[in-house]
Amino acid sequence: MTLLTSPFSQEPTFSHGQSPRTAVLYCNLGTPDEPTTPAVRRFLAEFLGDPRVVEIPRLLWLMILHGIILRIRPAKSAAKYATVWLPEGSPLKIWTEKQAKMLQGWLAQRGHDVQVRYAMRYGRTSIASQLDALKAAGTTRILILPAYPQYSATTTASLFDAVYLWASKVRNLPELRFINHYHDDPRYIAALAASVQRYWQNNGRPNVLVMSFHGVPERTLHLGDPYHCECFKTARLLAEHLGLSKDQFKVTFQSRLGRAKWLEPYTEPTLIDMGKAGVKRVDVVCPAFTSDCLETLEEINQEAREAFLHAGGQEFHYIACLNDDPAWITALCDITQQHLQGWPTQTVPNDARLAASKAAALAQGAKQ
Ligand SMILES: C=CC1=C(C)c2cc3[nH]c(cc4nc(cc5[nH]c(cc1n2)c(C)c5CCC(=O)O)C(CCC(=O)O)=C4C)c(C)c3C=C
Ligand SMILES: [Fe+2]
Ligand SMILES: [Fe+2]
């Protein structure tokens, strides 16, 4: 792109006459490149090596991570990934990419000239590489949109860290905005509720709806992380929307790692207790995940299902994540639009708008 100098001032303007480019970077956790032991080891080394994710003294943790965990876990996890892998790749990546494409298209339909890209905190497609690409394309305003409705330092703050690290190496920075959370956004809640209601219309209702959120160490709650409270608020709003009484739903936390205490109650033991107690049918929904991934497709829809049925339960229904649900993309669009306010993102370029208003003024003058 050539830079011209405006005849009226020393301000540079872009030769194609468009307003400065605005972009949305839709960020998710990340996933291995393939369901193999080496690829999962690479992914886990980066993920679990992040001090935001595992907060124990560095040296000790690096010894445990490289000495034990990365020798055992990758093969086990790779086998699990293989059970959910699709011909096009990892479900998390496929859904995240599709959501970003849909968001861009739907924003364009609403008249916003905004580029939407997706990025992953770990593995490919990295946050730094996408920010580099946006900067190279002349983007001057970037909105960081996490795929996580609930804020957690382990996820949201960690992805912001990656943005700050990139920014610390850039001379001429774009304007940056960050969305911390949307756990109580009425449009996200309505999309979740509609997906559950639709499922029930087609499949009947359960005795209990289990809302299973990804867990985090309990210690993070005592240190001030709002994740636990935000999960409970999402759950309460979802239950209200669905008209559920207290005994018709249950909040649980899944994916515990290591021996420390994580947020309770844990999903699988709760389901086993329910099966043993004679609960006939449970439906499970995972509101912290906006894309289906290993944690929902394998841990819930395979492992937790088996545990519940084995404990005496009769019917286990997994309600899919929001994925490409139109109500969810609409919610994402609304949330994005709200945070783009004040940034010029109209489809009609500034210069064309100016020319049109000058022409209108001239025509008005000619009439008088
Ligand atoms: C929804 C938000 C998430 C939070 C909060 C979170 C915290 C967290 N996770 C781990 C450890 C692992 N998570 C793994 C997979 C994984 N985690 C999330 C989301 C959150 N994690 C997603 C979307 C996924 C799926 C990725 C995919 O490729 O499909 C894994 C890897 C899988 C495995 O080996 O079991 C680990 C490990 C910790 C320690 C943590 C907070 C401290
Ligand atoms: Fe996780
Ligand atoms: Fe898991």
Image: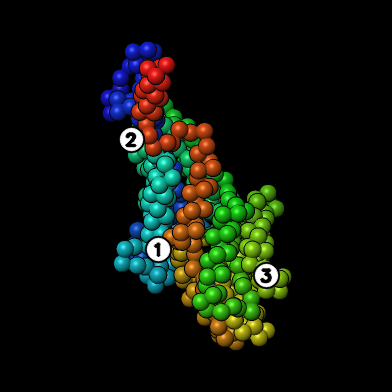
- Find numbered disc 2 in the image and state the secondary structure of the residue it sits on: loop
Q: Quadrant of residue 174?
A: top left
- Height in image: 110 above or below 326? above
Mark before the other along the chain sequence, 1 or 3:
1
Q: Looking at this view, is 137 or 252 the one in front?
A: 137
Please identify the quadrant where the C terminus is shown: top left
> Tag on residue 137?
2
Q: Name the residue at 59% across, 84% down.
A: 313
The residue carrying mark 1 has its beta carbon less than 8 Å from ligand 1: yes
345 left or right of 209? left
- Coloured how? rainbow
Please report the residue visible at 52 percent of the width from the left and 70 percent of the height from the top. Answer: 198
Q: Amino acid at mark 2?
A: Ala
The amino acid sitting under disc 1 is Pro
First of labels 1, 2 by sequence position: 1
Find out if the beta carbon at label 2 lies less than 8 Å from the nearest ligand 1 atom: no
- Mark linked to residue 244: 3
Residue furthest front in the image? 368
Q: In the image, is residue 310 above or below residue 363?
A: below
Residue 235: percent from left, percent from top: 64, 62
Q: Are marks 1 and 2 in contact (CB under 8 Å)?
A: no
Q: Is there a contact, CB below 8 Å, between mark 1 and mark 3?
A: no
Foreground: disc 3 or disc 2: 3
Which numbered dot is residue 91? Answer: 1
The crowd level at tag 1 (other Cα within 10 Å; few <14, some 14-19, many 20+) is many
Residue at (46% x, 61% y) in the render: 325
